[in-house]
Amino acid sequence: MTEITSLSLFELIKNIKEKKISSNEVTKSFIDRSEKSKKLNAYVTENFENCLKLSKEFDYKPNFDLKLPGIPIAVKDLFCTNEVRTTAGSNILNNFVPSYESTVTQNIWNEGGILLGKLNCDEFAMGSSNETSFFGNVQNPIAKNLVPGGSSGGSSSALAANLTPITIGTDTGGSIRQPASFTGTVGLKPTYGSCSRYGIVAFASSLDQAGPMSKDVKDSSILLEVISSFDKKDSTSIDFQRNNYSSELTRNIKGIKIGIPKEYRVDGMPSEIENLWKKGIEYAKDCGAEIIDISLPHTSYALPTYYIVAPAEASSNLARYDGVKYGLRSSGESLIDMYEKTRSEGFGEEVKRRIMIGTYVLSSGYYDAYYLKAQKVRQLIKKDFDEAYNKVDAILTPSTPSSAFKIGEKSNDPVSMYLNDIFTVPVNLAGLPAISIPAGTDKNNYPLGLQIIGKPFDEQTVLNIAYSMEEKINYKNNITDWWMK
Ligand code: GLN
């Protein structure tokens, strides 16, 4: 039999329901592999003992009607987990143990999922390579010394290395889709307001959204069905009719109109990415889709807009870490001194940079010139998509402008790091759903992803297109387990 850890979520559920394997066996397999994979540095906090205990309890009294029956799942360390340390990858929350549970994780436990551990991420989800984490960088299982993407880099690494069957990440400007693209996995950012933000450590509140990461599209549809819910505890949560994403999943996308935005053909785009995109268009046609050229004229303003809006909101959200209410407290001679020492010792470089940019663009005299202007441009970007969606049902683009880069290659050059988000941030600014699916490799055999962007609340179409293209692409990750040798 194939190794348990390489089974898809769908197959695991099937085997558990048919009593071919127990939850405890599944849990043991993932723990065993995780124990042997410490070199990847994917975990910040392990919950192995407790997970084993809960899996035994599940087996003793199984409930096969649940959507995730006894499935062990590791999650990004940005989701607050009751009585389990939650760090957001930061020193300032190094000793933070929440007394409440995020809605998204609660939804998972309610359906039978069991917490395997908390996965590494960029500090406060700020980054594209998982190098800003206080807990050190994460290795991409694809090859040695390669970044796994960010900020959900622990999640993408653990998933691609088969340390967890599925996982969840958060995506403020690409942090689910970009790491998925870098590790040959699937990552879906739902429409803003689909998945509750309650209990997720806030980065930029108008952009943050949780979503599934999985080995294939079907698994993402199963997980989305579990995590997407209306939640009164989140004032931005939206009450709309959610689909049964997994049972409504279909490969029949005949006649669906897919837009190709010319503005995504950016200057200096590597030919590998260009070719991947061309191939993607052919795959989509093979699936029965109709391809239509479209224009999203304000695309080039998305990145600068994002890097004003996101730091502005971050600087405000992070004001709460003052040594009084949460986590770390450094000693100081006065209250102000204590605040200053706590924040300078507790936050890393990138977070400080964002706080400074954010405070600057919000300060009087600059507010109109930067923040307000950025908000206006954000509206124009949103309008571009609205207009495009009068003509098409979805949009196809590359997920990232390159494959995974080497650890350290961009860490001293924030602008080149920010450029990584060029294809993902417009989606967050407009609040849309989008998925990244593995679609090919570059010259080094590193994975490359394609992104499918949908209409608001139309995750089903996004999933259906991804599901049919996935079958045609037939991508397989080539993981050699190098870190275990
Ligand atoms: N890489 C982007 C940033 O650093 C996006 C991060 C995210 O989506 N959380 O802000």
Image: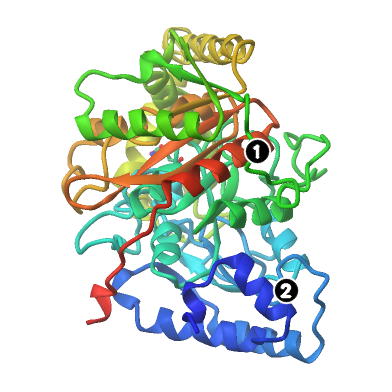
Task: Measuring from the top left, give residue 273's x and y in whole percent.
Answer: 28, 33
**Numbered tag placed on residue 461 in the rendering:** none
Mark 1 lies on a secondary structure that is loop
**Numbered tag placed on residue 69 in the rendering:** 2
Q: Label 1, on which residue?
A: 252
Q: How dense is the environment of label 1, judged by Cα within 10 Å: few (below 14), some, or many (20 and up)?
A: some
- Give amino acid for label 2: Pro
**Front-lying residue, 33 or 443:** 443
Query: How many numbered marks have been drawn onto this rendered protein structure?
Result: 2
Q: Residue at x 43, y 16 (%)?
A: 261
- Give amino acid for label 1: Asn
Q: Using residue 171 as the reference point, say whether residue 457 is left or right of it.
A: right
Depicted 114 relative to depicted 28: above or below: above
Q: Using residue 273 as the reference point, say whether residue 8 is left or right of it.
A: right
Does any portion of residue 202 appear in the rendered image?
yes
**Front-lying residue, 126 or 181:** 181
Locate ligand 1 by image quadrant: top left
